[in-house]
Image (tube, helix red, strand yellow):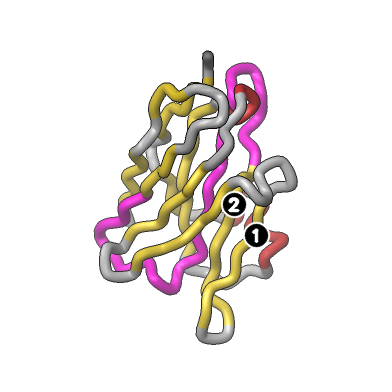
Amino acid sequence: VQLQASGGGLVQPGDSLRLSCAASGRTVSRFAMGWFRQAPGKEREFVAAIRWSGGSSSTSYANSVKGRFTISRDKAKNTVYLQMNSLNPEDAAVYYCAATPTYPIMSQLWLDAQYEYWGQGTQVTVSS
């Protein structure tokens, strides 16, 4: 599975961005998918995850983005999105998407070690 993240850019505080993570090589509709971010000088941190559960998808968010970010997937496009609203300078980072074909519980998807495949990252800069 190859993951291609895109959609990053330079925005002002309060603006919105939508990141995309396009998968190729295999259908990822049943994969658990996650978004992580890493700011300069900081460790990579969990942002959001979506997993297949009981015939539908369930999601989870880091507290710092809950209510502002939304993770979703388009099965037909084999793509996962991260809609980011009300961006602030603390959201500036390189954002990475990740995927795993396993079915861990949601709390385990907060750990980057759970993921088998990673995209290359897309830069998000928030500055006035």
Q: Quadrant of residue 106?
A: bottom right
Q: Is residue 35 above or below residue 12?
A: below
For the N terminus, give its image quadrant: bottom left
Residue 25 occupies which quadrant of the picture?
bottom left
Q: Which mark is residue 60?
A: 1
Q: Residue at x 53, y 47 (%)?
A: 35
How far from the left and from the top, in percent, is residue 54?
57, 85
Spatial distance from mark 1 to mark 2, Cα to Cα?
6 Å
Does the magenta segment cover residue 6?
Answer: no
Q: Is residue 117 above or below residue 26?
A: above
Left or right of residue 11, residue 3 in this image = left
Residue 48 disc label: 2
- Give whichever of 54, 124 is nearer the camera: 124
Q: Is residue 57 above or below residue 84?
A: below
What's under tag 2, amino acid-wise?
Ala
- State yes or no: residue 34 in magenta: yes
Total numbered labels placed on residues in the image: 2
Q: Amino acid at mark 1?
A: Ser
Apparent side of residue 111 relative to residue 70 in the rendered image (left or right) = right
Precedes in sequence: disc 1 or disc 2: 2
Identify the residue shown where x is 36% and y is 42%.
5
- 107 with respect to 95 (left or right): right
Q: Position of residue 24 (x, y in %)?
A: 26, 57
**Residue under the point 62% across and 34% down:** 44
Q: Residue at x 53, y 73 (%)?
A: 57
Magenta segment range? 21-45
Q: Residue lying furthest top in this view?
A: 128
Circle 2 SS class: strand
